[in-house]
Image (cartoon, grey):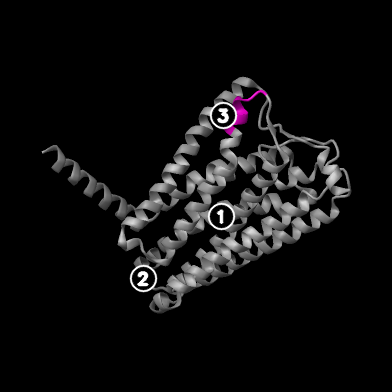
Amino acid sequence: MGTDNQTWVREFILLGLSSDWNTQVSLFVLFSVMYLVTVLGNFLIVLLIRLDSRLHTPMYFFLTNLSIVDVSYATSIVPQMLVHFLAERKGIPPVSCAAQLFFSLGLGGIEFVLLAVMAYDRYVAVCDPLRYSVIMHGGLCARLAVTSWVSGSVNSLLQTTITFQLPMCTNKYIDHISCELLAVVRLACVDKSSNEVAIMVSSIVLLMTPFCLVLLSYIKIISTILKVRSTEGREKAFHTCASHLTVVVLCYGMAIFTYVQPSSSPSVLQEKLVSVFYAILMPVLNPLIYSLRNKEVKGAWQKLLGQLSGLTSKLAT
């Protein structure tokens, strides 16, 4: 019966952010520029970490993973959104919709777990610096990264499968910028309570659990920093965590606001704006935050630019 119901909807229609043509053109230009900045910025971060041996540490290994996740997440949503800004008919086949839901939800889950892993890395760096290299060895870092990717992907596969088992009947208009989980679940023409429970459980496992680990890590970190007697030592310890803490506050804050209680979720417009925040703003902000607030990254940039300048001067002469 579920399969028959699924055939009733041959195409979903994404309503997007606006139906006004001029607004869509303006958003197309703005989001195109921001998407290009996202790809370029994160690519440069990964390239810089690869080229500078001083950045071959666990922290930057995880940052490389975060940059890959950010670009992938933006790519799962933004290109299709840009096409729809200029298209008269904003349709998406059910298979493409399911694929978009799987990748966006999976990559989002991976990022939350990855941020918790990075918090643990910062905890070890600040609270047990003498044993840092022993604890955060290559094997552990690889296992933590794999755990992040696998947990996010498995959760997304389960959620996507459950969601697209729901009969959609003739409901085909998705009032969102993409095939987002809550927006697709709302199309179902049957009782959705079991799906809401599944979303809640997923939120606890992949959002609240990592968040609690992050919170616990930073409680330990702050208590350790406060015990440092010298002002210089406290500032150094704080700068070690500043970039990651900024990203954590932005990322977890918006997610908890949106997903923890799907049955009493915010308005559709708020959901759209939150999705824009994750798909457009966060992938742009992450490389900026890690570049501007991190002395090691800024030093690596200066070194690379100095080498390029020297190479250019030699070629010119």
Q: Is residue 49 shown left or right of residue 194? A: left
- Residue at 64% across / 39% down in the picture? 273
Query: Which amino acid lies under the numbered mark 2 shown in the image of this protein?
Result: Ser
- Determine crowd level at label 1: few under 14, some 14-19, many 20+ residues with C-alpha closer than 10 A: few
- Residue at 48% across / 68% down in the picture? 142
The residues bearing labels 2 and 1 have C-alpha atoms spaced at a distance of: 27 Å
Decide: is 128 above or below 242. Answer: below
Q: Indicate which disc, 2 or 1, sits on the residue closer to the N terminus.
A: 2
* Residue 167, x across and y down, in percent: 84, 45
* Residue 24, x across and y down, in percent: 60, 25
Residue at label 2?
A: 230
Residue at label 1?
A: 249
* Residue 48, x across and y down, in percent: 35, 53
Tell me which segment is drawn in magenta: 82-88
- Determine crowd level at label 3: few under 14, some 14-19, many 20+ residues with C-alpha closer than 10 A: some
The label shown at residue 257 is: none
Residue 225 in view, yes or no: yes
The label shown at residue 27 is: 3
Q: Is residue 32 shown left or right of residue 93? A: left
Decide: is 19 above or below 280. Answer: above
Of circles 2 and 1, the one toward us is 1
